[in-house]
């Protein structure tokens, strides 16, 4: 039995993947901003920014300001690249029609067909059927 993946299904899956990636992005940015602002607030409160960046709040706590910077940078990159990541993770089938699976290979040197000869699905070869 062959699984048929329609372009609508792939777009729906990509939309869900983008939602998850962007949610993770927002969480990383929010937590990172909190960690950075916590250190800045400590510096403002003590009027000694050097102390704020040297002080450890709990045993084995890492330097939260620098960890926060990393989280904000990674979160922003995920947010900006979420569409490309989703398209990379949920790719179109490499060969054949996405609806019926028919091998739509043009003859050597010929342009790809505009429609699947088996089911008639409009194929957009220039954009990778996305």
Image (spheres, rainbow, N blue to C red):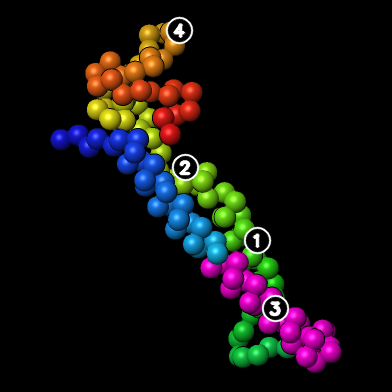
Q: Residue 127: give x, y in percent of width and height.
A: 48, 28
- Mark 2: which secondary structure? helix
- Mark 1: which secondary structure? helix
Q: Quadrant of the C terminus?
A: top left
- Residue with the mark numbered 3: 37
Distance of label 4 from label 3 (alpha carbons): 60 Å
The reply to whether dot 2 and dot 3 touch (C-beta < 8 Å) is no
Near-viewer residue (82 or 49):
82
Q: Quadrant of the N terminus?
A: top left
- Mark 3: which secondary structure? helix
Mark 3: few, some, or many residues within 10 Å (few <14, many ≥20)?
some
User: Bounds of the magenta span?
Assistant: 27-53
Q: Residue 56: give x, y in percent of width and height.
A: 68, 88
Q: Is residue 74 magenta?
A: no
The quadrant holding residue 34 is bottom right
Q: Find residue 88 and name its label.
A: 2
Q: Residue 99: give x, y in percent of width and height.
A: 28, 30
Q: Find residue 73 and name its label.
A: 1
Distance of label 2 from label 1 (alpha carbons): 21 Å
Is residue 63 at least partly visible in the picture?
no
- Residue with the mark numbered 4: 109
The reply to whether dot 4 and dot 3 touch (C-beta < 8 Å) is no
- Residue shown at the point (61%, 54%) measured from the top left: 77
* Left or right: 59 as drawn, with respect to 18: right
* Left or right: 110 as drawn, with respect to 39: left
- Residue shown at the point (65%, 90%) measured from the top left: 57
Lower position in the chain sequence, tag 4 or tag 3: 3
Lower position in the chain sequence, tag 1 or tag 4: 1
In the rendered image, the residue lying farthest to the left is: 1
């Amino acid at each position: 039995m062959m699984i048929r993946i329609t372009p609508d299904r792939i777009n729906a899956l990509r939309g869900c993947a983008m939602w998850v990636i962007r949610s993770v992005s927002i969480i990383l940015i929010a937590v990172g901003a909190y960690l950075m602002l916590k250190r800045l607030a400590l510096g403002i409160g003590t009027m000694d920014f050097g102390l704020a960046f040297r002080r450890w709040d709990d045993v084995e706590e890492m330097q939260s300001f620098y960890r926060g910077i990393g989280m904000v940078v990674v979160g922003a990159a995920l947010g900006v690249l979420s569409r490309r990541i989703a398209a990379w993770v949920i790719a179109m089938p490499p060969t054949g029609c996405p609806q019926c699976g028919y091998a739509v290979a043009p003859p050597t040197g010929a342009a790809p067909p505009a429609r699947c000869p088996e089911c008639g699905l409009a194929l957009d070869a220039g954009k990778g059927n996305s």
